[in-house]
Amino acid sequence: MSSSPHDGEQTRFTPPEDALTKALFDVKSANPGLGISKVHAQVLKNHPEWLVSEKRTKKILQNHGLIVASSPSSNDAEQPIYPSSRMIEGLDLFQWTSKVQVKYFDKKKGKGLVATEDINEKDVIWREDPFIIAPEWEIFDMQVAATACGYCTTPLTPDSPLIIPCPASSSSSYCPARFCNRLCAARSSKVHPLLCPSQNPASAPLIKFAKDTQWMALHALAQLTSRILLVNQYSDSQADWEVVRGLAELGMEDRFKYSFKSPNQPEPDRPTWKKAFELYSQAFKEPKTPQDQKKLTRILKKPLPAAIERGLFDYELGFLRNLGKMSLNLEAHGGLYTLHSHLNHSCDPNVSVRHLDQRTALSRITVIAKRPIKRGEELFITYVNPKLGHRARLDELRGWGFGACICSRCVEEALMVNQAPAVNDELDDLADELKAGLGVL
Ligand SMILES: [Zn+2]
Ligand SMILES: [Zn+2]
Ligand SMILES: [Zn+2]
């Protein structure tokens, strides 16, 4: 007998660390999408004489940062971060639609919307006006130039007899705001007075600062604060405050830590936050001059409940936290929509959000089914440009403060990189990698 089944075993040996590491690097860099077990199998295929356990492969891959350890205790800098959200108490969905309901998934994922009935492709699921609106700067400029409605952002028809100017504007203290009609003017009384250069001049530096720094979240927070303070004057602001409390959040510190800096959208830094907070306090609490203080006191007669006061004006627990909430929840055009803010992300969304009422209510959104949606299925929008490749989407999501996306499309595309057929444990490995917040491309 020239060979026995055990001959192979006898000649195999345990390779030294550096040889194994080099082999692992070679395989991983040629096929970055491979999971641990595939890399392991490939190395053994290239070196049939080696005796290596999968555990050892995994350890080396981890030590060299080729794969991130998925155990929670390993290294907190690489832990995935998810925004947290809570249910909005007493929220009446039927004002928008009966086709969806709010579902609380778990602490990590938070809430989302699921269909209560089968929905057809192209069906309008709901229409919604903004809770607050901090419009894109081009539209904001139109509002300041009095060519777009100060409330609903719709471009104004010049010379329309329906247009109403800001009632507080006068030749001595001018406010450029004009509204489509009496309805928009009446609705604007919930937000406008505290941001009106005539009624509350102390807010002007804050708005200017937001504009100069192109800081949409700050602008939105100014709008939100104005709404909460004003609603509190003539009724109860608790219901509005519940909406704010229910918004998904990620602290600014987390966002700062996990943001990838992109050259076209630099994040404001810490001194900028401080400066913004100073202007914010001057706008809504302590104007610098006695004249401005007098004007503010004329609008704000009734103090906020202590919890809401803290929730807005405490630097860490209020201001920074709320900025984070604004960044996370603003719709692309700058509005914050109560029901819309419940939608979770997928890179293969099943609903789209449109501004269809261009001539009557530009800020109103219409949520439409992109494909048939079955009863019980979750509704998803996309937070990123779906035309981007996998890696670019991942980077953008990270910029928003999200961990790696594990939607079906991301998992599929990550697998497609290596053309090998997907095997189950590889898929598991990959899901682990993605969950651990590491891109695999
Ligand atoms: Zn309007
Ligand atoms: Zn005004
Ligand atoms: Zn995805």
Image (cartoon, rainbow, N blue to C red):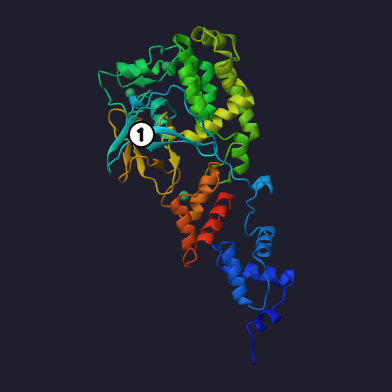
Which quadrant holds the C terminus?
A: bottom right
Q: Quadrant of ligand 1?
A: top left
User: What's the residue type where badge 1 is placed?
Assistant: Val
Image quarter of residue 39: bottom right
Residue with the most extreme right position: 16
Q: Is residue 291 above or below residue 27?
A: above
Q: In the image, residue 245 lies at what x, y percent?
A: 52, 25
The percent position of residue 33, horizontal first and vertical second, equals: 54, 62
The one of 206 and 243 positioned closer to us in this rendering: 243
Q: Is residue 421 above or below residue 201?
A: below
At horizontal 35% and vertical 41% (from top left) the residue drawn is 352
Q: Nearer the viewer, residue 384 or 55?
A: 55
Residue displayed at 56% across by 10% down: 293
Which quadrant, please, contains the N terminus? bottom right
**x and y, in percent, of residue 427 in the image:** 51, 58
Q: Kindly identify which residue carries mark 1.
A: 100
Considering the numbered disc 1 on the image, is that residue within a helix, a strand or a loop?
A: strand
So how many labels did they put on this image? Answer: 1
Work out whether residue 4 can be spotted. yes
Can see residue 223?
no
Q: Residue at x 33, y 40 (%)?
A: 375
